[in-house]
Image: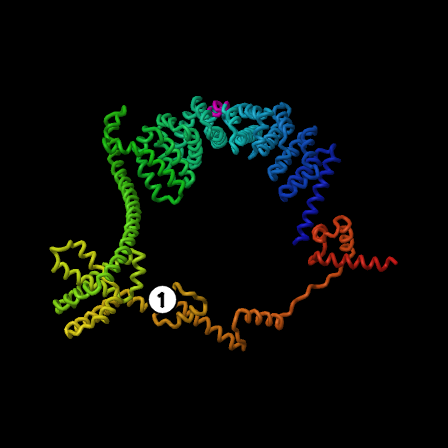
């Protein structure tokens, strides 16, 4: 493949050199020069690097001088066409040709009366290529006066408004005129050039005459493209275009094309082109939408929007134009509502999947928000100079519009309601976080305080608990059950929301329910006996949190109880407490999958597999993993038994694979190819020109397929050794 590419490159270079020599030595034969130029053009079109090489060997400048100095028009046309094609193909060639001398020569070709139409067309084509996407070219076309000649051609090339394209002369003139329009479009835009826009705006009256007198696709498309690009993003030029009646002309053409769109599809397409030009005119000046209301452009655009032949891009252009029309003009807004524009916009929002089209429809609805509010308050406030029958029809349509507007209001109300709910949830989350942090601090402080008080009180609180347990032995178990259950649920909800206390709760283990049962029971007793002495808030805060359970155990060890009734009640309490301690959370932890619980452990591929296999309560996800692993191991064992090999580790696997390749597979050697005499000559010539750069030599000469740079080096060293031995 490399040798074929090098052969093609060498052939291309050889052909270009020969063609350039042919151009130089065939100055008296214009036909051969024309054929050589056409061949150069075809070579440059086939190979992108051909233009660069042609520029390097000086062919580009020679063709430029040939176009200037030749006496034959056919040679000039071919030379200009070749220059334009090469410059269009390569940016470096474009920059090389972009000089003031070439623009002056092209201006002379265009202004000379002796130049035929084809020569002018080729000159305009070269200007188009040099100015396209090139700010330097836009500056030179203005400074050399070339743009002035182009504007003069725009006025004078076509003298009659009735075009008979079947005539050859008229058709050639039309081609020149359309090329001039395209070149002027490139001169003012991409990149935008304000100075060239100011020069080209003098052609607006002539363009308006063409739009009025010749409504054909051959005229409307180039003229609308020229007007739209000249107006783009330039408020001064837009105001001048409106002052010369351009917007009125566009409106009239749009009305006529819209009426013809029901008959032919081409009229609908042309109407979209005119719509884009109107949008470019009022995009930066929405106040000029009042002019469009005279011709009822909004209603025409709505009917055009319903045409079946339009695609999503064309519908987007129409809706965007409606948005600019209704942005700052209440008459256009009212016209939109009067012609059922609101349901069309809602339908476009619901049915279309294009983001740009949805944004344009939303833009139209946003513009009509004020007028809809007025219509909702009083539908009869707008008084226009119409007859009573027309007013009745308007009222009927307004009622329908009111129904559609109610639906739209409901949609907006739902959206606002969802946004409010989202904001309220955010505020509640922030408040919840603040409350949780304050609760954590209060819980820690109360735990510390109560723990210190319990140590200081000592036997007094213990005697009080004993006396209370003796007084009410029968009601004790029942009270513990009821109060512990309720407090257990409250405590769980509290622990879920508080992180620091959750840690203390986990450390306490099974004794947590005992604290709650004792606290709730002591709280009820205290409320019955000492209600008049202490405040209820202080009682609840003093008795909710009891001292830790180890203190209770130590207390029983220090003060043994000899009363059998008390001992029996204590045993019952322990049974109830152990039953309550095993809540649903702890039971669920016992029967959960060990793979899901083991989060903090250091796991790897070996001990995690053992952990899953040893767990009797596997979840569905880990059960699938274990089954897949067992299936893979069984298949692996079967394959190893068949091959009579034992595979232990990845290292051993690599060793076995290397052994199998060395023992079973035999590496193929390259077929030996002796160097021919031509290859030896190539090698010696390459070393003389390039030195010991074997890769360059290999790429520069057509060696046999399969040759490498190392082969050339070995062969050259053998040749040099042989020459040294033969020398003495």
Closer to us: 268 or 372 = 372
Left or right: 566, with 326 as reference point: left
If the image is split into quadrants, where does the C terminus sit? Answer: bottom right
Q: Mainly helix, strand or loop, the magenta region?
A: helix
Residue 664 location in percent, x, y? 61, 72
Q: For this rendering, which residue is in front, 243 or 532?
A: 532
Q: Is residue 83 visible in the rendered structure shown here?
A: yes
Q: What is the quadrant of the N terminus in the image?
A: bottom right
Mark 1: secondary structure:
helix
Tell me: residue 322, above or below residue 582: above
**Relative to 449, is 212 on the left or the right?**
right
Q: In which quarter of the view is residue 17 placed? A: top right
Seen in the picture, residue 78 relative to 667 is either above or below; the reply is: above
Residue designated by label 1: 620
* Magenta span includes 81: no
- In this rendering, the answer to whether 326 lies above or below 454 is above
**In this rendering, position of residue 181 left or right of residue 83:** left
Query: Is 491 drawn above or below residue 7 in the view shown?
Result: below
Identify the residue shown where x is 40% and y is 28%: 285
Residue 684 placed where, x, y %? 78, 52
Side of 129 relative to 269 (left or right): right
Q: Quadrant of residue 391?
A: top left
**Mark 1 surroundings within 10 Å by alpha-carbon count, few (fewer than 14), some (14 through 19), many (20 or more):** few
The percent position of residue 554, horizontal first and vertical second, equals 25, 69
Colour convention: rainbow
Question: What percent of the width, then of the height, locates residue 388?
Answer: 23, 26
Q: Please give the count of numbered marks on the rendered protein.
A: 1
Q: Nearer the viewer, residue 187 or 456?
A: 456
Q: Is residue 166 visible?
A: no
Write down the region rendered in magenta: 202-208
Name of the residue lying farthest toward the right: 728
Q: Nearer the viewer, residue 402 or 692?
A: 692
């Amino acid at each position: 493949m490399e040798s074929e590419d090098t052969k093609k490159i060498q052939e291309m270079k050889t052909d270009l050199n020969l063609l350039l020599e042919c151009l130089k030595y065939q100055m008296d034969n214009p036909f051969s020069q024309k054929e050589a130029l056409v061949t150069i053009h075809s070579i440059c079109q086939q190979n992108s690097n051909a233009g660069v090489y042609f520029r390097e060997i000086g062919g580009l400048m020679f063709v430029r001088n040939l176009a200037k100095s030749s006496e034959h028009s056919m040679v000039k046309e071919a030379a200009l066409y070749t220059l334009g094609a090469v410059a269009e193909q390569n940016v470096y060639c474009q920059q090389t040709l972009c000089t003031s001398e070439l623009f002056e020569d092209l201006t002379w070709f265009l202004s000379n009366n002796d130049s035929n139409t084809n020569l002018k067309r080729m000159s305009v084509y070269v200007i188009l290529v040099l100015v396209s996407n090139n700010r330097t070219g836009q500056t030179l076309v203005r400074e050399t006066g070339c743009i002035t000649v182009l504007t003069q051609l725009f006025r004078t090339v076509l003298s009659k408004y009735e075009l008979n394209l079947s005539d050859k002369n008229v058709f050639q003139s039309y081609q020149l005129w359309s090329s001039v329009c395209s070149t002027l479009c490139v001169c003012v835009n991409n990149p935008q050039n304000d100075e060239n826009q100011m020069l080209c705006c003098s052609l607006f009256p002539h363009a308006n005459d063409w739009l009025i007198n010749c409504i054909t696709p051959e005229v409307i498309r180039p003229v609308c493209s020229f007007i739209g690009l000249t107006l783009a993003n330039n408020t001064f030029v837009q105001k001048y275009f409106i002052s010369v009646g351009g917007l009125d002309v566009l409106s009239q053409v749009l009305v006529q094309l819209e009426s013809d769109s029901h008959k032919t599809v081409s009229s609908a397409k042309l109407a979209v082109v005119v719509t884009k030009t109107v949008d470019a005119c009022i995009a930066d000046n929405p106040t000029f939408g009042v002019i469009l209301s005279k011709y009822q452009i909004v209603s025409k655009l709505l009917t055009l929007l319903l045409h079946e032949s339009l695609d999503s891009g064309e519908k987007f252009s129409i809706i965007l134009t409606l948005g600019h029309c209704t942005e700052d003009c209440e008459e256009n807004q009212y016209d939109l509502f009067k012609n059922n524009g609101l349901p069309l916009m809602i339908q476009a929002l619901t049915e279309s999947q294009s983001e740009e089209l949805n944004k344009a429809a939303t833009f139209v609805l946003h513009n009509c928000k004020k007028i809809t509010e007025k219509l909702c308050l009083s539908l009869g406030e707008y008084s226009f100079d119409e007859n009573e029958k027309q007013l009745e029809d308007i009222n009927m349509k307004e009622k329908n519009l009111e129904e559609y507007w109610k639906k739209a209001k409901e949609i907006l109300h739902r959206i606002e309601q969802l946004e409010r709910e989202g904001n309220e949830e955010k505020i509640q989350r922030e408040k919840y976080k603040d409350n949780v942090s304050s609760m954590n601090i209060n819980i820690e402080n109360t735990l510390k305080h109560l723990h210190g008080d319990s140590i200081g009180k000592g036997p007094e609180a213990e005697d009080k608990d004993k006396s209370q347990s003796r007084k009410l032995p029968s009601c004790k178990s029942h009270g513990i059950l009821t109060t512990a259950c309720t407090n257990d649920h409250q405590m769980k909800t509290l622990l879920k929301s508080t992180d620091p206390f959750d840690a203390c709760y986990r450390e306490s283990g099974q004794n947590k329910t005992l604290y709650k049962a004792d606290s709730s029971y002591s709280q009820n007793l205290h409320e019955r006996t000492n209600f008049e002495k202490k405040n209820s808030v202080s009682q609840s805060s003093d008795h909710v949190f009891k001292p830790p359970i180890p203190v209770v155990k130590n207390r029983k060890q220090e003060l043994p109880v000899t009363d059998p009734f008390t001992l029996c009640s204590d045993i019952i309490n322990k049974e109830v407490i152990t039953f309550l301690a095993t809540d649903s959370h702890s039971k669920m932890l016992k029967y959960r999958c060990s793979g899901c619980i083991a989060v903090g452990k250091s796991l790897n591929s070996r001990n995690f597999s053992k952990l899953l296999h040893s767990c009797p309560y596997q979840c569905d996800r880990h059960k699938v993993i274990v089954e897949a692993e067992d299936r893979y191991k069984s298949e692996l064992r079967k394959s190893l038994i068949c091959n009579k090999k034992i595979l232990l580790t990845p290292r051993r696997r690599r060793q076995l694979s290397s052994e199998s390749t060395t023992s079973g597979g035999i590496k193929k050697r390259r077929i030996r190819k002796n160097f021919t005499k031509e290859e030896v000559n190539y090698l010696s010539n390459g070393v003389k020109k390039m030195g010991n750069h074997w890769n360059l030599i290999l790429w520069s000469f057509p060696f046999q397929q399969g040759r490498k740079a190392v082969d050339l080096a070995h062969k050259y060293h053998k040749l040099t050794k042989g020459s040294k031995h033969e020398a003495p």
